[in-house]
Image (cartoon, rainbow, N blue to C red):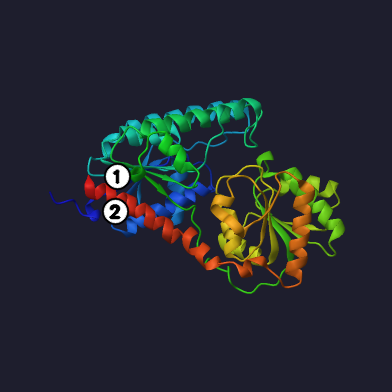
């Protein structure tokens, strides 16, 4: 039987996890996959909330949306226990809203769970779409790590981490039962875990986290204004205390030391910067555009990555494609993805972190950059959005052609 053309098919992106005005790394990833599907002739539809609707318009995507909430939700403080309960309630309402509208997904359509959370994956599992895809972005902490707070992203209340652990395990278990399917994973170590869960080799695909291999301002000559740069949020997972200790030491030991902090964190960090006497040394840029971010990377000598846990952080890739050396703790998730492109130090050894950063600053001030001796072009190609989009489209076409 002849298969419907891509132009007559619809792919539904189930994305109930989008809140607020700023996009997370996973959001950026699925928007790129949506663009790839649209350019290939698929009709693209999203299931999600009003915040998602805003971003679809802002991104200029040729896509429709099925709203899964009655009205915009604002003011949920996920950092408080009450806020986490309210967020879970909202997740459930969006999930229920999605199930009520599942009749919009036809058997000849494709459905893609943009996260590994139950409120995105279970609707895909229960839909009538023949072609079903999900993505696994990061390994949740296991139960023991949650109880002991053995991973830096587990907060004191533990409620969010318990939900993450339960949600991910249920999603992977439920999705394993459907066929045909494709599960996309973003870290090489995930492959063995999926095979142990009963997934077959032909059902899973490694997909890169995705970077623009040649973003605006990434190769333009830029005077080096800052010795170090950091971007992130204020959370113990991000190694904020280690970052501040490093900045304090470098300010004393490196002549005319300058540092830049990117992101909407000035209100939280500036008091501590002033307390440490670093206000004349550390500059806050605030939230910046993508183009400005790459310009600032080019104007810096070393990227600091003091995080105590990460998966496959895109920001490291973005720093590298700008030719920006990276110093990071040797957490187990980095080497399989970034290999020799990072300068590693023993985990949580602040003295070693500071020492390696100082050495790199001195080298780059002298005109030497270790990245010049490595194959950055190959890294750009393998980590590129083009490669990620190609893998996604091959997975989608495999399913729709066999469905």
Quarter where residue 280 is shown: bottom right
> Which type of secondary structure does the marked residue at label 2 adopt?
loop
Query: Label 1: which residue?
Result: 110
Side (left or right) of 124 relative to 349: left
- Where residue 135 appears, as percent x and y from the top left, is 42, 43
The residue located at (22%, 47%) in the rendering is: 402
Mark 1–mark 2 contact, CB under 8 Å? yes
| Labelled disc at residue 43 | none
Which of 254 and 205 lies nearest the eye of the viewer? Answer: 205
Q: Is residue 216 above or below residue 344?
A: below
Which residue extends farthest left? 1
Query: Label 2: which residue?
Result: 42
- Where residue 82 appears, as percent x and y from the top left, is 60, 26
The residue located at (25%, 40%) in the rendering is: 130
The residue located at (63%, 70%) in the rendering is: 372
- Where residue 386 appears, as percent x and y from the top left, is 42, 61
Which of 53 and 149 lies nearest the eye of the viewer? Answer: 149
């Amino acid at each position: 039987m002849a298969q419907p053309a891509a132009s007559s098919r619809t792919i539904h992106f189930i994305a109930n996890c989008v809140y607020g005005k700023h996009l997370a790394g996973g959001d950026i990833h699925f928007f790129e996959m949506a663009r790839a599907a649209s350019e290939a002739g698929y009709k693209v539809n999203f299931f999600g909330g009003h915040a998602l609707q805003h971003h679809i318009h802002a991104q200029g995507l040729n896509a429709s949306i099925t709203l899964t909430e009655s009205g915009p939700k604002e003011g949920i403080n996920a950092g408080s226990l009450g806020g986490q309960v309210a967020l879970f309630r909202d997740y459930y309402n969006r999930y229920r809203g999605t199930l009520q509208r599942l009749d919009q997904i036809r058997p000849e359509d494709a459905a893609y769970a943009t996260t590994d959370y139950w409120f995105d994956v279970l609707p895909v599992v229960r839909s009538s779409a023949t072609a079903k895809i999900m993505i696994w972005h990061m390994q949740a902490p296991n139960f023991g790590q949650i109880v002991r707070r053995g991973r830096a992203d587990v907060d004191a209340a533990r409620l969010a981490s318990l939900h993450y652990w339960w949600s991910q395990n249920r999603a992977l278990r439920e999705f394993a039962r459907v066929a045909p399917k494709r599960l996309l994973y973003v870290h090489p170590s995930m492959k063995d875990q999926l095979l142990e869960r009963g997934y077959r080799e032909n059902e899973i695909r490694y997909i890169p986290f995705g970077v623009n291999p040649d973003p605006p301002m990434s190769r333009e000559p830029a005077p080096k204004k800052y010795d170090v740069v950091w971007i992130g949020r204020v959370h113990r997972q991000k190694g904020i205390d280690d970052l501040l200790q490093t900045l304090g030491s470098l300010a004393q030991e490196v002549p005319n030391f300058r540092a830049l902090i990117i992101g909407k964190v000035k209100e939280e960090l500036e008091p501590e910067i002033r307390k440490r006497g670093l206000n004349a040394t550390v500059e806050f840029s605030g939230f910046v555009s993508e183009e400005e971010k790459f310009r600032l990377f080019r104007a810096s000598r070393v990227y600091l990555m003091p995080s105590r846990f990460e998966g496959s952080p895109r920001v490291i890739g973005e720093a590298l494609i700008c030719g920006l050396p990276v110093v990071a703790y040797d957490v187990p998730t980095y080497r399989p993805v970034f290999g020799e492109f990072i300068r590693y130090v023993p985990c949580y050894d602040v003295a070693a972190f500071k020492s390696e950063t100082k050495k790199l600053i001195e080298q780059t001030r002298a005109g030497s950059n270790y990245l010049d001796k490595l194959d950055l072009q190959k890294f750009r190609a393998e980590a590129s959005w083009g490669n990620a989009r190609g893998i996604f489209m091959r997975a989608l076409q495999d399913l729709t052609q066999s469905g």
